Image (cartoon, rainbow, N blue to C red):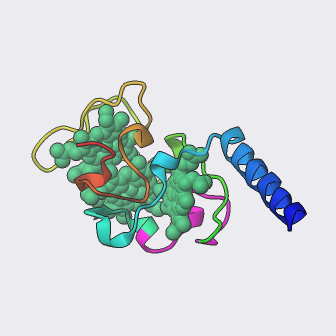
């Protein structure tokens, strides 16, 4: 029993270390569906491998946090030209990554925003 718990602890610590090592950002993790005000197309469709290493929803593996993955479908954001939205211009991103303001999954706020 004691050895079993110790082994579990070691596995837990190793998993945490792995998460920290590859910089996984828990803030960006998906939230329960019924709490979401907005949800992202590719996430809704279960296409995890659009951004993650694998298409296994229970273990999709690491994802890239660079903007390149976003530009694949949101090309209009690539340059420095202002992007026109329905009623306003998109905020200037500057040096902030897309995932600095938006979750790639689903959000308690509109437009996949991390904060209001
Ligand atoms: C549009 C791109 C995109 C799609 C589609 C996407 N993800 Fe992610 N996901 C990301 C990014 C970017 C991160 C942050 C990775 C990091 O910080 O290292 C992330 C992080 C996560 C995390 C938290 C960090 C971790 O590794 O534990 C989980 C859980 C997750 N995604 C699950 C999913 C699942 C399940 C799907 C498919 C149903 C999915 N994602 C689809 C981009 C995406
Ligand atoms: C495989 C294609 C695809 C990729 C890759 C992708 N998106 Fe999207 N995204 C969509 C679609 C489809 C929509 C819904 C239609 C629309 O609003 O253009 C959308 C909508 C959005 C919206 C608006 C959501 C709303 O509620 O109106 C945001 C914000 C967004 N994406 C951010 C991102 C970010 C950040 C990334 C990179 C991490 C990303 N997208 C990568 C396909 C994609
Ligand atoms: C500084 C924060 C910030 C950054 C960085 C940012 N966004 Fe946004 N984005 C917003 C806000 C705020 C809105 C919602 C504006 C509104 O509807 O009032 C938005 C809206 C959007 C929408 C919805 C557009 C529509 O017509 O409603 C998309 C798509 C989007 N962003 C994609 C991106 C992509 C791709 C990147 C990375 C290149 C990015 N955003 C970076 C703050 C940001």
- Residue 74, how many percent across, how many down? 39, 50
Q: Nearer the viewer, residue 11 or 53?
A: 11
Q: Residue at image x 61%, y 71%?
A: 58
When the figure is inspected, residue 81 is found, relative to residue 40, above or below; the finding is above
Q: Quadrant of the C terminus?
A: top left
- Residue 41, how many percent across, how many down? 38, 66
Q: Residue at image x 13%, y 41%?
A: 88
When the figure is inspected, residue 91 is found, relative to residue 107, above or below; the finding is above
Q: Residue furthest top?
A: 95
68 left or right, relative to 114: right
- Residue 84, how many percent across, how many down? 20, 42
Query: What secondary structure is the magenta-colored segment mainly?
Result: loop
Res. 77 in view? no
Counting the numbered discs, the total is 0
105 left or right, relative to 25: left
Query: Does the stretch in magenta take in 52?
Result: yes
Q: Quadrant of the N terminus?
A: bottom right
When the figure is inspected, residue 105 is found, relative to residue 100, above or below; the finding is below
Q: Residue at image x 45%, y 66%?
A: 43
Q: Residue at image x 14%, y 50%?
A: 86
102 left or right, relative to 1: left
Query: Does the stretch in magenta take in 108?
Result: no
Q: Residue furthest left?
A: 87
Q: Residue furthest right?
A: 3
Splitting the image into 4 quarters, where does residue 44 fall? bottom left
Res. 32 in view? yes
Splitting the image into 4 quarters, where does residue 6 fall? bottom right
Q: Which residues are magenta?
A: 44-57
- Residue 92, how many percent across, how many down? 28, 29
Q: Nearer the viewer, residue 63 or 8?
A: 8
Where is ligand 3, by quadrant? top left
């Amino acid at each position: 029993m004691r050895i079993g718990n110790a082994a579990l602890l070691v596995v837990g610590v190793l998993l945490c270390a792995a998460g920290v090592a590859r910089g996984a950002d828990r803030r960006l993790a998906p939230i329960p569906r019924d709490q979401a005000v907005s949800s992202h197309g590719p996430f809704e469709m279960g296409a995890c491998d659009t951004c993650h290493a694998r298409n296994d929803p229970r273990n999709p593996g690491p994802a890239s946090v660079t903007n390149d993955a976003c530009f694949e479908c949101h090309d209009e954001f690539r340059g420095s030209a202002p992007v026109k939205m329905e009623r306003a211009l998109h905020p200037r991103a500057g040096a902030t990554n897309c995932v600095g303001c938006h979750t790639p999954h689903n959000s308690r706020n509109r437009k996949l925003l991390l904060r209001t």
